[in-house]
Image (cartoon, grey):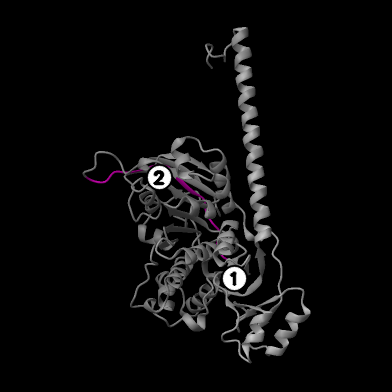
Amino acid sequence: MPDPFPTGGPAAGAGRPRASGATIELDRLTKRFPGSAAPAVDSVTMEIRAGEIVVFVGPSGCGKTTTMKMINRLIEPTSGRIRIGGEDVTSIDPVRLRRKIGYAIQSSGLFPHMTVAQNIALVPRMAGWSKARTSARVEEMLDLVGLDPAEFHGRYPRQLSGGQQQRVGVARALAADPPVLLMDEPFGAVDPITRDHLQDELIRLQHELHKTIVFVTHDFDEAIKLGDRIAVLRERSHIAQFDTPEAILTNPVDDFVSGFVGAGAALKRLNLTRVRDVEVVDVPTATVDDPLQSIFEALRSGTSNEVLLLDRHRRPYKWLRRGDLMRAKGSLARAGTLVHDTVTRDATLRDALEAVLTDNAGRVPVTGRRGAYEGVVDMETLMKSVHELLEADRLEAVEHQHRLEEQRAEQTRRAQEGKPGGPEGGS
């Protein structure tokens, strides 16, 4: 049987074309566990398009993780079919299947006795890649997830922060260039700020890689931020609504879905707009290696009363005001205010707004690859976007009310004329 969803093959690797995503079709997929009266997953039918992120969200125990694990057959289906790239993979060797599907879980799942490089190289080595090709791939993947290969190559998982471990976990899942990536609450065990940055990193990676990603979460805000489409699942993975985040926010199909949307749908729509969609401005900058006198002159000659100090890797480090330099007395060690948070261009406006409010400074630095400075987004820009979203929601509500009134008027007219479709005619 031909390979149902080939990776990049012998040519794949550093500097070579990567495999893009593959379609996933679930056809009446069902799982009954022994001893259970009802199925855990009951006849799920769904098509996931190539290159999109689909997020499964639903209450605990609804079957979302079980459904995802049947895709790579970590859980064997009781009945139904799974097609990837148009090929039925229900009966092929499950070990071979799993080598073709990336898998990332909560707390990274890294092997503690292996170095970062050994963890990432695991699947390529099992797939028979050459030593040179595997080594090049490890370097490429570390760079892709924003970790310096020279710094992290030989470290062990215990020497990494939680966020760094999750980045390595994603690198390992992508190392063999699979067209499909399954992610089971991968960012659930890290702090909120790190989680936001990891979400941004996944969005950035997807812009480059165009994989097909199935992502499981219990956090509806995370689903809105990441998903091209969201599958809201009821008990036994029955699909309540499968649509774009915007459609679910503005038109939930019933009270069950509305419960997931929750209050403040207009503000939740801030998760649909990215920093890259609004104006990012530049501010005066200096580096820690610049002489104090040149920094002072930049402040004195500039229109702003502050300078953003960058470290040696051009990452935002401190905000310096004119008064800070007067008190510096030849040293920047105690001068200025540390930058507590940054956002990437893939961050949502909600992330940026939270960062600005937390920092209480009216602006937040925007960073790119490896945290390098790219600009600043300010409160004025963010509030303008908030007002635009609220106004759009107000107009949508007015239009919706008009449509309802027109429908009622039409029903009344039909009823008066004795035509079907009125209160007694039914239709």
Tell me the quarter of the image containing the C terminus.
Answer: top right
Q: Is residue 292 left or right of residue 264?
A: right
Residue 183 placement: quadrant: bottom left
Mark 1 residue crowding within 10 angstroms, few (<14) / some (14–19) / many (20+)? few
How far apart, in angstroms, are the residues tagged by discs 1 and 2?
33 Å
- In this figure, which residue is indicated by the disc labeled 1? 16
Tell me the quarter of the image containing the N terminus.
Answer: bottom left
State the extent of the magenta-drawn residues as a range.
Answer: 18-34
**The label number, if any, that marks residue 209 in the structure image:** none
Task: Decide: is 280 above or below 82.
Answer: below
Whether pointer 1 and pointer 2 mark residues with C-beta atoms closer than 8 Å, the reply is: no
Q: Residue at x 45, y 44 (%)?
A: 260
Q: Residue at x 57, y 56 (%)?
A: 350
Front-lying residue, 42 or 373: 373
Residue extending farthest to the bottom is 330
Front-lying residue, 427 or 133: 427
Q: Is residue 245 left or right of residue 46?
A: right
The x and y percentages for residue 331 are 61, 90
Front-lying residue, 37 or 185: 185
Residue 330 placement: quadrant: bottom right
Q: Earlier in the sequence, mark 1 or mark 2?
A: 1
- In this figure, which residue is indicated by the disc labeled 2? 81
| 22 is within the stretch colored magenta | yes
Amino acid at dot 1 = Arg
| Count of numbered circles on the image | 2
Amino acid at dot 2 = Arg
Task: Decide: is 106 above or below 33.
Answer: below
Q: Is residue 38 left or right of residue 298?
A: left
